[in-house]
Amino acid sequence: MAGIRGVLRRRSRGAFVLWIAIYTVLAVLPLPLGMISLDPGRGFWINLSVALGFVGLAMFGLQFVMAARSFLVVHPVGMDVVLEFHKQMAYLATLLVFAHPIILFVVDTSLLGLLDVVTSPLRAKFAVGSVILLIVLIVMSVFRRRLRIRYETWQATHAVLAVAVVVTALLHVLLVGYYVREWWEQTLWIAYSAAFIALGVWVRLVKPLVRRHRKWVVESIEDDVGSVTTVTLRLLDPTSYAPHRFHFDPGQFAWLQARRSPFSLSYHPFSISSSALHPHRIRFSIKAHDGFSREIGDLVPGDTVYVDGPFGAFVLPDTGPVVFVGAGVGVTPLLGMLETLADRGDDRECVLWLGNRSETEIPCLEQIEALQARMDLRVVHVLSKGSAGWTGERGHVDAALVARLLPDTPPGSSFCICGPDAMMDQVEAALAAGGVRRDAIHSERFGMV
């Protein structure tokens, strides 16, 4: 939970506590209902095993809620917290689910015969199948990059495997039957199942249907340095978001899908690098990595793009001077904030510390220089491989840089940080050590997916 705690130092702890409380109640609700008519004759360890399995199953069901990109779930704490929580709860749920059969086998070794899927009853077949599917899901998720699985392929198979794991586990529970005989137990699992089915319909059918009528088109494509491509999207019909209008807070991001059906399982998150004052024309600067980020340069003006969002709790502070800290394309949400300030005519003092490899590998440099001419913005470029003629800062955006530059920042500054996790960890720790208030440090985890 260290990653979550680090982000929440700058978020609403009250919202997170309430969020966790609701999650915990939903996860453990099967236990008190299941114990109303508990048979003590089955023994403590058998009942404990089943209890752990029930909680694990409920937690796996709640994983769909975490991954649904629902505004009600995401907005209080931010998408990066939700996805990190989703990942860590998957590990815990897996531990509980594996503990269920292990305890049974230790207590009664004769049950090991149920692992023979040829002769075992159907309920055992579903249990074994669920565990095997779960192992495949975990391996593909943890070792995706080592296995060189494309993000799009992983995203689709992850969704299918997750559904298969929960469905086979639920069928196992229903066929065992002992702990779902009472009407209150049946009511609970029917309610859970109906809720998860409704969520699936909402995510995979209703939301794509809505997005189908909210088309964005590519207005322009521009190549930048370091395999970075800037794409500008225009909302084809601004009234398609009626009765509300599309809007976003500076610093937020959206999930994109292009040249495919809105029902596709694969969407990709990118920060919006344009002004929030022009919400019907949004810009993204994307560095080629794999999958969609590499294919973005193949788009042409007029291509249809579907946008799911906006999301993110990493937004521009309301008042006071701001120090923006970024590295590479981590600058993109910071540019969205700066563009918004410039369009508002905001005269607050701003500083940008930006790390890159060399003078020729600074993404969005023209945009940054144009902003300097429009607002009170001082830029400190930090290069790790600057040329012999480079007279600016050298090295990396790290604790040492913070120690050097912090005394020259405007009093009462807020700090907005976006970049690789290691960079943010160092900068956040150095700012706190330098006396900056925790609530004045804002960040977004750059590598959250």
Image (cartoon, rainbow, N blue to C red):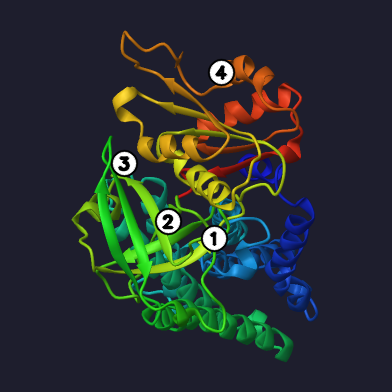
Q: Is mark 4 on a helix, strand or loop?
A: helix
According to the picture, the residue beneath numbered tag 3 turns out to be: 146
Of mark 1 and mark 4, the one earlier in the sequence is 1
State if disc 1 and disc 2 touch (CB < 8 Å). Answer: yes
Residue 53 figure quarter: bottom right
The image position of residue 297, as x and y in percent, is: 22, 52
The image position of residue 309, as x and y in percent, is: 49, 66
Q: How far apart are marks 2 and 3 (CA)?
A: 21 Å
> Label 2 sits on what residue type?
Pro
Q: Is mark 1 on a helix, strand or loop?
A: strand
> Label 4 sits on what residue type?
Leu
Q: Residue 401: which disc?
A: 4
Q: Is mark 2 on a helix, strand or loop?
A: strand
Work out whether residue 116 can be spotted: no
Circle 2 crowding by C-alpha within 10 Å: few under 14, some 14–19, many from 20: some
In the image, 114: left or right of 262?
right
Of mark 2 and mark 4, the one earlier in the sequence is 2
The image position of residue 132, as x and y in percent, is: 40, 61
Q: Is residue 253 above or below residue 173?
A: above
According to the picture, the residue beneath numbered tag 2 turns out to be: 269
Residue drawn at point x = 39 percent, y = 18 percent: 384
Q: Is mark 3 on a helix, strand or loop?
A: loop
> Of the residues tagged 2 and 3, which is closer to the observer?
2
Q: How far apart are marks 2 and 4 (CA)?
A: 29 Å
According to the picture, the residue beneath numbered tag 1 turns out to be: 311
State if disc 4 and disc 1 touch (CB < 8 Å). Answer: no
Work out whether residue 323 can be spotted: yes
Residue drawn at point x = 64 percent, y = 34 percent: 349
Q: Residue furthest top?
A: 388
Q: Distance between the residues labelled 1 and 4?
A: 31 Å
